[in-house]
Image: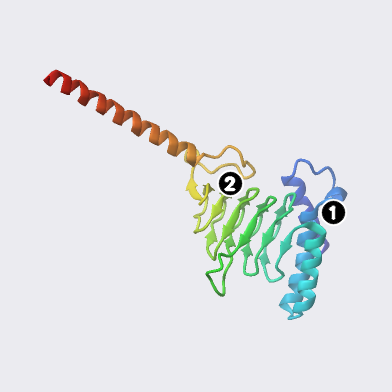
Amino acid sequence: MFAQLREDIACVRDRDPAARSALEVLFLYPGLKAIRMHRRANWFYRHNMLFLARWISQRASRKTGIEIHPAAKIGKRFFIDHGTGVVIGETTEIGDDVTLYQGVTLGGTGKDTGKRHPTIGNNVMIGAGAKVLGPFKVGDNTNIAAGAVVLEEIPPNSTAVGVPARVVRRNGMRVDNLDQVHVPDPVRQEIEHLNHTIEKLEAELSRKVEDAYEDL
């Protein structure tokens, strides 16, 4: 138990430059408190003590602003930065070395039964306010940009941005794990494409007008 706690504290200090000491992380970080309470709730859930499991998870939600269903499966070195408004659904599965920022939802669409929530691979970063909705996989080493709404499977080593999210790449390489800013903007790319198309059409129209005047 203590080895796991040390690992949890170390991963926070590695990923959050604002973390000044192990004591600060232990006593003042709601993400760490939420995951510690989730582990207890999950133990009770797996041993069919469902009321106690939900009681612990709801208490954690009140204390931290982070709601994790006790049945959710979460791997090692899980880091929730800030954490307010994070929601993790019942059938969610999360791999190792995953980072979530505030306002993230790992939820369902209301259309599925059984497995309703996403499976998140290893070494995934999900930016502030992103929503991942549905029973699909987000591959290893993937970044979900802030504010994205992911509604379908994302392959490994990808960056997904936008609403609805689509996979993009920067210079053919994966974006740095903690960088939520320097990702391609699909809206800007689409506008640039439209402007280029308009310029071609205007040039073609201008040529046709000139030809028509010459015919006259």
Q: Identify the residue under disc 1.
A: 26
Of tags 2 and 1, which is closer to the observer?
2
Circle 1: element type: helix
> Is residue 4 visible to us here?
no
Q: Seen from this angle, which residue lies furthest bottom?
A: 48
The residue depicted at 30 percent of the width and 28 percent of the height is 202
Q: Which quadrant of the structure image shows residue 8?
A: bottom right
Q: Which circle marks residue 145 in the picture? A: 2
Q: How is the image coloured?
A: rainbow
| Residue count near mark 1 (Cα–Cα under 10 Å), binned few <14, some 14–19, many ≥20 | some
Q: Residues at badges 2 and 1 in contact (C-beta under 8 Å)?
A: no
User: Relative to 64, is 188 on the left or the right?
Assistant: left
Residue type indicated by callout 1: Leu
Residue 41 higher or lower than 79, as above or below: below
Residue 59 higher or lower than 113, as above or below: above
User: Relative to 34, is 75 on the left or the right?
Assistant: left
User: Relative to 146, is 111 on the left or the right?
Assistant: left
Residue type indicated by callout 2: Ala
The residue depicted at 76 percent of the width and 72 percent of the height is 54
The residue depicted at 67 percent of the width and 62 percent of the height is 88
Q: Seen from this angle, which residue lies furthest left?
A: 215
Q: Quadrant of the C terminus?
A: top left
Residue 114 x %, y %: 57, 75
Q: Quadrant of the N terminus?
A: bottom right
Circle 2: element type: loop
Counting the numbered discs, the total is: 2
Residue 154 versus residue 4: which sits nearer the camera?
154
Mark 2–mark 1 distance (CA, rounded to whole Å): 28 Å
Residue 185 x %, y %: 51, 39
Residue 5 x %, y %: 80, 59
Quick one: label 2 or label 1, which is nearer the N terminus?
A: 1
